[in-house]
Image: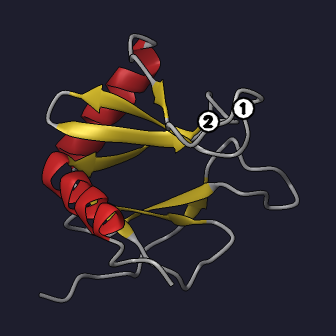
Amino acid sequence: MKYSTHGKWRKSSYSTQEGGACVELADLGEALGVRDSTDPHGPILRFGRDAMAGLLTHIKSGKLAWRKSSYTSQEGGTCVELADLDAAVGVRDSTDPHGPVLRFGREAVAGLLGRIKSGELDR
């Protein structure tokens, strides 16, 4: 099935005037699109409206228990944090705890972790 990528893209309010590393959102009709603001021709994540509303509710509640990746050093470093979002997993930049959060289904995360552990994605 081919999905629409056309819509009016809006940068996150956390994005700087210079662009910065942030996300853009668009109404794609059947879903809400999220993409990297520094790569407008790159991949697009699609979220159902209910999924996005649930994610925003969790973020605004401040009740998420974020866990840093085991690859994050004691000094912090550039890495990711994960949180349980009921039926999904939230992912955010560990250096920007108030920045954007991506939401992925549990099966998608489990599949990705399996591919990483097997070495399938090594270059």
How would you rate the neighbour count of disc 1 (Cα within 10 Å): few for under 14, some for 14-19, many for 20 or more?
few
How would you rate the neighbour count of disc 2 (Cα within 10 Å): few for under 14, some for 14-19, many for 20 or more?
many
Q: Quadrant of the N terminus?
A: bottom left
Three-letter amino acid code of the residue under disc 1: Gly
Image location of residue 73, percent across then percent down: 68, 35
Labels 2 and 1 touching (C-beta < 8 A): yes
Secondary-structure class at tag 1: loop
Please, is residue 77 above or below residue 23 in the view? above
Residue 7 can be seen, yes or no: yes
Q: In the image, what residue occupies the spot 86% across and 55% down?
A: 17
Secondary-structure class at tag 2: loop
Q: In the image, what residue occupies the spot 29% across and 82% down?
A: 4
96 with respect to 122 (left or right): right
Q: Which residue is mark 2?
A: 94
The disc label shown at residue 76, or none? 1
Image location of residue 71, percent across then percent down: 56, 43
Image location of residue 3, percent across then percent down: 23, 82
Residue 101 can be seen, yes or no: no
63 with respect to 99 (left or right): left
State which tag comes first along the sequence, 2 or 1. Answer: 1
The disc label shown at residue 117, or none? none
118 with respect to 33 (left or right): left
Three-letter amino acid code of the residue under disc 2: Ser
